[in-house]
Image: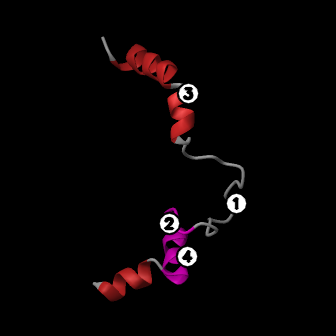
Amino acid sequence: ARLFIDFAISDEGQKIFIQRGRESAKPGLKPEGYPAHLKLFPSRVQLAEKLEEYTQRYRALFVR
């Protein structure tokens, strides 16, 4: 199991994940055509700044 984990987190292992349509856990290893400017997750500060807005949107969509 340890050898598999070592391989899975290596550059070679991460490239295989990318080839199979998965995201890499390593910064800098992105699939071909991956937008460089794409921001996938807002930081906690950004979430906190808009928490009330997000809460209202959530309630409007899911809470009845």
Sequence-earlier tag: 1 or 3: 1
Q: Are marks 4 and 1 in contact (CB under 8 Å)?
A: no
Q: Which residue type carries mark 3?
A: Glu
Residue 27 is left or right of residue 6, and the answer is right
Q: Are marks 2 and 1 in contact (CB under 8 Å)?
A: no
Find numbered disc 3 in the image and state the secondary structure of the residue it sits on: helix
Q: How many marks?
A: 4
Mark 4 neighbour density, 10 Å: few (under 14) some (14–19) many (20 or more):
many
Q: Which residue type carries mark 1?
A: Gly
Residue in view at x 36 percent, y 80 percent: 5
Cα distance between the residues tagged 4 and 1: 14 Å
Q: Where does the image place residue 46, in percent across and percent down from the top left? A: 57, 34
Q: Nearer the viewer, mark 2 or mark 3?
A: 3
Find numbered disc 4 in the image and state the secondary structure of the residue it sits on: helix
Determine which of the numbered discs, if any, sits on residue 15 in the image: 4
Mark 1 neighbour density, 10 Å: few (under 14) some (14–19) many (20 or more):
few
Sequence-earlier tag: 2 or 4: 4
The single residue placed furthest to the top in the displayed view is 64
Find numbered disc 1 in the image and state the secondary structure of the residue it sits on: loop
Cα distance between the residues tagged 2 and 1: 17 Å
For this rendering, which residue is in front, 2 or 18? 2
Sequence-earlier tag: 4 or 3: 4
Q: Which residue type carries mark 2?
A: Ala
The residue wearing badge 2 is 25
Looking at the rendering, the stretch of residues picked out in magenta corresponds to: 10-26
For this rendering, which residue is in front, 28 or 20? 28
